[in-house]
Amino acid sequence: MAVEVDKAITSRSQCVIEAETGTGKTFAYLVPTLVSKQKVIISTGSKALQEQLFHRDLPAIQKALDVGKKVALLKGRANYLCLYRLSQHVSHVPTDDPDVMHQLAMVAKFATETNNGDLADCVGIEEDAKVLPYVNSTADNCLGKECPDFQDCYIRKARLKAMDADVVVINHHLFFADMAVKDSGFAELMPTADSYIFDEAHQLPEIACDYFGESFSTKQLNDLIADIRVIYRADIPDMLQLGRTLNKLETAVADFRLAFPLEGAKGDWRLMLKERHICDGLHRVISDLDFLYQVLKTCLDRSEKIEPVFERTLNLKGKLERIFDVNETGFSYWYEAGKRSVHIHITPLNIAAKFAEMMAKTEAGFVFTSATLSVDGNLQHFANSLGLKPQSQLLLESPFDYQQQALLCMPRYLPESRDDLMPHALVKLAKQLILAAKGRCFLLFTSYRVMHLVYEGLSDTLPFPVFMQGQSSKRIILEQFVRHGNAVLLGTAAFWEGVDVRGDALSCVIIDKLPFASPDDPLLQARMQDCEKRGQDPFAAIQLPQAVISLKQGVGRLIRDSKDRGVLVICDNRLVTRPYGQIFIKSLPNMQRTRDLGKALAFLETIA
């Protein structure tokens, strides 16, 4: 693999490599990166992987090779402390929430100690902390060179360091954010790279679709209102009309959110636009936003802080007007209702041509690698999704002895996956497996509803700690799971990938059903219709490959080391009863297989 990566970097060509767990793929691309004379950008799937690469893997390889390359870590702007917004909110906190007040004090103390402003280093502030919108900046609210703290800006410093580095570690979201908006600063970094290496590359097609599209959310409006309110109270409290206008817009935005279904609902935005109450609510928001724009115009000479929010108001007005235009082909128009906000998306159905064009413009080398890129032993699905024409392709199997280390069980006599009795059957099955494994189990689900039902059935009946996604941040839950050594963890999509639990803490992974995307998903429906128009079978071309890659990710949680042993249980009869079940099985590691639950329990008891 290292040789192939080296060729791609040297010849600036494309290379696609599936390297399964245990192959050492990180070292295989870091060695040629560090010995080359080129500037290389490494993009990973998550911030956690970024930090592992930068703080653990890169220093180890640099030491082994004895090379002194300059390396830099660059995250998206939301990860850095904004000194200007901190000082604004310390002097004028726009909330009575005691959590925010307490966290703000913690961040203010952190600001006196940090060199890089990375909020991940601020102890006690988690990824979902309430204080974050008050102390970081967005592309919308950043003042750029007009900011009084510009010289001390941590984002600016991080970008300057990245400009000067030989190797820069970023993440996929940052890469695409730059491609889509050419955000100032990072835009200057990209053209200087000679090669790009994408780890966890299976995530790229989905992330690319988000960034090549457009989206609007009511959260953007609420953030704007909050920022203007701080300026109003601190600088121009006598502008009472501004205060009243903000209150009126805030009410209109809240009413618009309430016009949508409950949290978690997704649907076709074009159909929603035909609903009278939705259109009325949207027109009211636009009308109140337009009035805010007029009021801000009169305030421009009252405070220098008004101009940036005036520009944001104008941009949001344009976005709101654009979401009425739903007639362009090749896009999916869909909405998603969250707890407090509504997101409306215009997503391209195919980004292959756009991504291929971007690669051609850079004239750089591109390496794509992951443990899960192939479907049924073939990399074509991945290559097609991004418009790749790789000069080199590799499929590298794991060195682990799966026949000895692992057992796949597909239990008999389970209800069909959609049967109402399935959660009850899962509880009964999981209890036996958990007791045999003495805890040490992951239960991975495709739906929150089933996860909650199974949690209710298990939490009070087991002699082991039981954790569920959502009780705390992902990092804290994982730390607790490993620390206990005999715990049970229930999770959905977030825990199917990017989770590395080695050794005795995990001996059994139970998957409730094959991870096909929900047929109600409006983006999936649009892609399937588009696929049909091109004369292809949407199930074979879209649904099946996506599900196979997702399942491989979940299965990959079990065996992480040559000494690991464990049982994988997939509770979906379709693996055996449907022809496509064989495609799933052939895509999984070659472990022992059984339909006898007793054999799985016996295997667990030998390692418990």
Image: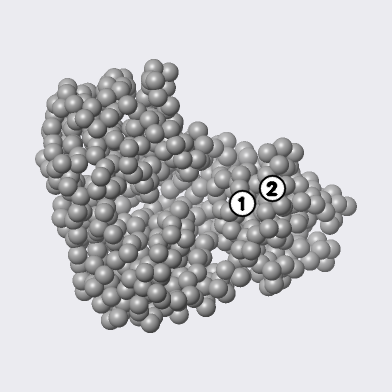
Residue beneath disc 2: 106
85 and 252: which one is in front? 85
Q: Residues within 10 Å of mark 2 (few under 14, many from 20)?
A: some
Secondary element at tag 1 = loop
**Residue 279 vertical placement versus 440 (above, below):** below
Where is residue 532 drawn, in percent x and y?
A: 22, 52
Q: Residue at x 35, y 37 (%)?
A: 505
Where is residue 123 drawn, in percent x and y?
A: 61, 48
> Disc 2 residue type?
Met
From where the camera sits, is residue 551 visible? Answer: no
Residue beneath disc 1: 122
Q: Is 285 left, or right, of 40 in this rendering?
A: right
Where is residue 175 drawn, in percent x and y?
A: 45, 65
**Residue 246: assigned label:** none
Q: Is 348 left, or right, of 113 in this rendering?
A: left
From where the camera sits, is residue 439 visible? Answer: yes
505 and 175: which one is in front? 505
| CB within 8 Å, label 1 to label 2 | yes
